[in-house]
Image (cartoon, helix red, strand yellow):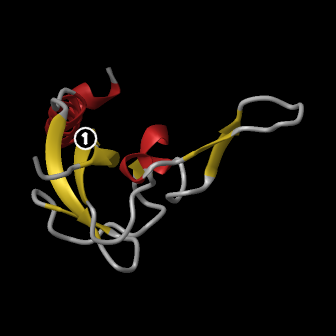
Amino acid sequence: MAFDGNPGTNKLANVLISRMKRETESPLVLDIGEIQANGSLLTNTFPVPIPQGDYSVCRLAALGTTGSILTTTSEKIPLHSVVIPEKMRSVSAGDRVLVAWVQNEAVVVDIIQKS
């Protein structure tokens, strides 16, 4: 191998390999966060706001606003619309959310509500 002749380079390569293995073997971590007024996400374990667009949101936590039409039951008159209820609305400012950390990416799973 090319690095066998240089112990410093070989040692650096081994350190990098061990750190990469540790990073990829990190378990899924669940966290609690809050959506801030500017749309950023602030979590308990990473107390630095993550800007909107730099975190992901599960599809069911991004359906739309309360009262928006989710679907229409038929294409013929009379049309019957299914609207999004309050409990199924998209995440918004002030919501406490369940966050799954997948490697270094925060993923908002759902809104947390009081019992």
Tell me what residue is drawn at x 54 percent, y 54 percent.
64
Q: Is residue 56 left or right of residue 81?
A: left
Residue at the top extreme? 1
The residue carrying mark 1 is 100
Asked if residue 101 is positioned above or below residue 89 in the image, the reply reads above
Give coordinates of residue 27: x percent, y percent.
Answer: 15, 29
Question: For the view shown, which residue lies furthest in the front direction?
Answer: 78
Which one is nearer the viewer's eye here, 98 or 114?
Answer: 114
| Residue 6 in view of the camera | no
**Mark count:** 1
Left or right: 92 as drawn, with respect to 23: right
Q: Residues within 10 Å of mark 1 (few under 14, many from 20)?
A: some
Relative vertical location of residue 83 with respect to residue 48 in this rendering, above or below: above
Which residue corresponds to the image point at 24% horizontal and 42% vertical from the top-left? 101
Residue that protrudes farthest toward the bottom in the picture: 37
Image quarter of residue 49: bottom left
Q: Is residue 38 left or right of residue 96?
A: right
Q: Position of residue 32 (x, y in %)?
A: 15, 52
Q: Amino acid at mark 1?
A: Ala
Tell me if 90 is positioned left or right of 5 in this view: right
Q: Is residue 42 visible in the rendered structure shown here? A: yes
The residue that appears at 52% across and 59% down in the rendered structure is 65
Q: Quadrant of the N terminus?
A: top left
Front-most of residues 7 and 106: 106
Residue 13 place in picture, x, y as percent: 23, 36
Q: Quadrant location of residue 94?
A: bottom left
The front one of 73 and 15 is 73
x then y, percent, for residue 39: 40, 72
The residue located at (24%, 47%) in the rendering is 99
Front residue (pair 72, 95): 72
Query: Helix or strand or loop: what does disc 1 sit on?
Result: strand
